[in-house]
Image (tube, coloured by chain):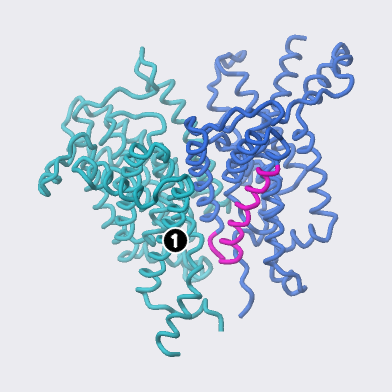
Amino acid sequence: MEYFDTFVSILGSAIRLSIPLLFTALAGLFSERAGIFDIGLEGKMLASAFAAACVAYWTGNAWAGLGAGILISIIFSLLHGFASITNRGNQIVSGVALNFVAAGLTIVLGQAWFNQGGRTGQVPPEGRFSGIILPGADMMREVPIIGPLYANVISGNNILTYIAFLMVPISWWVLYRTRFGLRLRAVGENPGAVDTAGVSVVWLRYRALIVTGFLAGFAGTYLSIAQSAAFINNMSAGKGYIALAALIFAKWKPVPVMFACLLFGFLDAFANFMQGKSMPLIGEVPVQIFQALPYILTCVLLAGFIGVARPPKAGGVAYTKER
Amino acid sequence: MSTASVPLPGWISYGVIPLLNLILAFFFSGLVVWAIGENPFEALKFLIEGALGRGDAIGFTLFYATSFIFTGLSVAVAFHAGLFNIGSEGQAYVGGLGAALVALSLDHYVPWYVTMPFAVIGAAIFGAAWAFIPAWLQAKRGSHIVITTIMFNFIGAALMVYLLVNVFIVPGKMAPETRTFLAGGQLPKLDWLMALFGLKLGPAPFNVSFIIALVMCYLVWLLIWRTKLGYEMRTLGISPTAAVYAGIPYVRTVIIAMLISGGLAGMMSLNAVMGASARLQVEFVAGAGFVGIAVSLMGRSHPVGIIFAAILFGILYQGGADLSFEMPNITRDMIVVIQGLVIFFAGALEYMLRPAMVRLYQTARGK
């Protein structure tokens, strides 16, 4: 039973660690399927984490924090669109630039406003998203196997966690069952055809980026006012890139994105758990291996050794109407 | 007719437009400073004084610029071949391993000028090796080089932390770093060069790698504009299909371009590891690889432009430290904001001003 308890606790923390990845990877899904590469996911996550923490600190309202996080993330998305859609700039360069702006600005403003070395103030409990105990969690705890799973893994998470998992079928439905989704996928494969059909490529791509900003805003908010109670310097710590890796690992499809994020979250949780412990037969495994594993796996996948990861055809190329 | 196809003279494309973009970037940086409640002009004054006011300040500025020249060249070489190498950061980090291994094994036996050429080769080989797999994946398997180099930055960081914590750490010490190199493994400072201008270097770690960097600038210029390989790389960068049609081997050119790029990034470690700290430390690259992106974009991927852009960023990095001391409200991370804005305006929005400039130019010429 001891092993099972450990397993349940790792699973619980895997879910908590995979939520920001899930929001961000779904965010990236919309822009990349529309043909806009987004290296700037990391920056959006960081900027929205900062905005959410600030507003939640000032208002004491978690939902206001979420709103601010989403707003700032959409603004970053629109800047990316302005550079890469309207001005046909290089999408990678634009994403890299916005990541730096976010990384620098959050610290500069944080220091100027809070004077705590880049931290924001401690957000009061009512300004945070705290865990929700699902009905019957305490009663179920005694039931073997299912009980601990229900009580510790499914119940006790905050509302954003449930929203994240809800976003998976919603994203799928939007992408594959609506007119907007069909056109969005088309514009990522062949913008010329979409243009010929009389649909504005520019407006469609902007809308995709707004969705991206919207979802990435949840990710940042989750980091600063659900997982912790303040913004900390560079708190996204490369999660945006892991989410990008998860998106590629999932071959740009919503449901696989969820599994990829859970896998990477699990690796993260497992690495935390394994720190300083030794495994049977192998001995102590360096924690860095687990940290590097998501990236290694993604490279192996990209190399075409586990199926083929085929990105949207028109990705990374600005659309120019014929002259 | 669309303005995109109108040719503009070189002095507008390579002079006026980049300068205007730079001014825009600094304008918005000034807005940020103003929003915090400080005077942007005063901040600029502190920044420039802090970077150029004293001999040791200039030494630090040039020390930073040296690193940025290497990483800027690294990004530029790949860029000429149409490859966007975001991995200079990781390549420089792993390159440090090469430099450190050479320094650690030779410093007991030979003076620095014997160690140096081996260290240059060591750093370049390790940096190039770290670029090899992404290059091979791009060339052979079509994996996007941007993604793979990002992944390799993280893998490299994990690898280096592992090596420093578990292999190179000095027994009994807490800090994850190698032992300090003896004089035979250090690159000497350029105090004599500063003395020529009547300046005292003081504690600034401005060292011989600056000269190596300038030599590399010349070699890169030679490579890109005066050799067959450089011609092939540029052709590939402008039009891959035309290059392949002309019989330029795609796989070979991509891999060689990335190896050179990685090697140049790796050499950045000479400056930081052998020139300044005299030991290999965790995170010694400290973002220089990413600054290389800004430097290369601003310098239009030309070695001369890269030297100027690298010095500008050297000023920002050194002056930024002084600025945060004078104005505690502005942290050193302000330079990251400026760096981001420079990349945004000089890189992503490079075409924004073009239509307006074309109209202005046409009106001025009376068309």
Q: Tell me which amino acid carries mark 1.
A: Leu
Say if the magenta span includes residue A68.
yes
Q: Residue furthest bottom?
A: B367
Q: Secondary structure at mark 1?
A: helix
Q: Residue furthest top?
A: A2
* Relative to A58, B269 lies left or right: left
Residue at position x 35%, y 36% from top?
A: B96
Q: Confirm whether residue B339 shows in the render.
A: yes
Is residue B179 positioned above or below B211 on the image? above
Is residue B61 positioned above or below A272 on the image? below
What is the x, y in percent for residue A294? 61, 35
Residue at position x 51%, y 35% from top?
A: B155
Q: Confirm whether residue A300 shows in the render.
A: no
What is the x, y in percent for residue B247? 47, 68
Quadrant location of the N terminus of chain B?
bottom right
Q: Which of these two is toward me, B160 or B350? A: B350
What is the x, y in percent for residue B188? 18, 36
Number of dots carrying numbers: 1
Residue at position x 43%, y 57% from top?
A: B27
Residue at position x 33%, y 52% from top?
A: B310
Question: How would you classify the magenta stretch by its main secondary structure?
Answer: helix
Say if the magenta span includes residue B144.
no
* Relative to B210, A222 lies left or right: right
Q: Quadrant of residue A15?
A: top right
Visual hue assigned to chain A: blue
Residue range (magenta): A67-90
Image chain in cyan:
B
Quadrant location of the C terminus of chain B?
bottom left
Which chain is mark 1 on?
A: B
**Residue under pointer 1:** B24
Q: Which of these two is toward me, B34 or A25? A: B34
